[in-house]
Image (spheres, grey):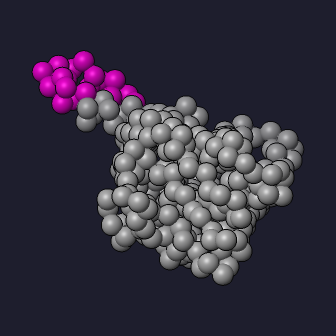
Amino acid sequence: MENYTIDLGYMPTTTFDYGEAAPCMGTEEKHFAANFLPPLYSLVVIFGFIGNILVILILVKYKKLKSMTDIYLLNLAISDLLFVFSLPFWAYYAAHDWIFGEALCRILSGVYLLGFYSGIFFIILLTIDRYLAIVHAVFALKARTVSYGILTSIVTWAVALFASVPGIVFHKTQQENTQYTCSAHYPPDSLINWKHSYILKMNILGLIIPMIIMIFCYSQILKTLLGCRNEKKQKAVRLIFVIMIFYFIFWTPFHVASFVHTFQTSFFYPDCDSQSRLDKTIQVTETISMIHCCINPVIYAFVGEKFRKYLYTFFRKHVAAHLCKKCPSLYREKLERVSSTFTASTAEHDISTGL
């Protein structure tokens, strides 16, 4: 029997195979997505764009990208912005059909995957960066340079782009009844193999390997910190550790849901009711994962002391000054006091997270 695919209009990367069973209509899931996703995506676009732009601005304007950590944090913010860039298109698609053509279907699907893979890769690099700085401090003096940071960032983007190629190649538009969809269409003779390998690759690269690396790095970091009890080093680890924890909180449910959805026939007999519940679970968990692109700037603001000071300086100097042009004396003296605190030495900067 012919394989059927259904696109729920909320995600550029998922197709659904019903095998020998008659296809479920998916009307309820489509209606759920049309009401649930656009408003949430709109909020993510607003807060994700503003937050990550501020991170980039502070890293470039105030931090001057003087360390490997700054380079990785900059690239992580760019990865988050890739998600934000594509969300308005997926928000419209969730409520309507695909009107943007096949070229944008492929490009935006690739942008989604590129942002996903590059984001987790740069979190891994940040973890390794902290590992080297704390556990192998002498070696880190030579290895943790801006030049190596730029070089490894270029290699990371290349690897992320390579991992995203199947999404770009196989995604295309297709007319179903009176509407157009944008979804993955694999070769019919190897449909199941492609789908399974696609999800397994995403789970392995996005969850399993990062978890193994991070558990190893942070176990060694904690062992070292318990031995030296250096307060500055403990503060240096805190930001990256929180970024890592929040990544797994927001992305693990989607990885688990996508794995169960793809291999559902191995766990239970799929009927339309269970299919509907899984589809909705995928919608909810992927939306939660996309909210992650708004979280990192919030983490910086609450965990990174220097970031808060730079952010305060920026708003006092560029926002408050324009809103209150006639009363600069109210904030000039305090601004000068805050600015004077940013004269840390190069050695102190290198041991911190930069934020």
Quarter of the view holding residue 226: top right
Question: In the rendered image of this protein, does residue 234 appear above or below residue 102?
Answer: above
Where is residue 292 shown, x and y percent of the image? 55, 43
Is residue 151 visible in the rendered image? The answer is no
For residue 334: magenta?
yes
Displayed quadrant of residue 41: top left
Residue in the foreground of this view, choosing between 337 and 123: 123
Residue depicted at 87% across the width and 44% down the height: 227
Expressed as whole percent of the image width and height from the top left, the position of residue 95 reads: 39, 44
Which span is picked out in magenta?
Answer: 320-346
Camera-nearest residue between 273 and 98: 273
Q: Is residue 133 left or right of residue 145?
A: right
Percent x, y of residue 345: 52, 48
Q: Quadrant of the N terminus?
A: bottom right
Is 6 one of the magenta-colored residues? no
Q: Residue at x 43, y 62 (%)?
A: 176
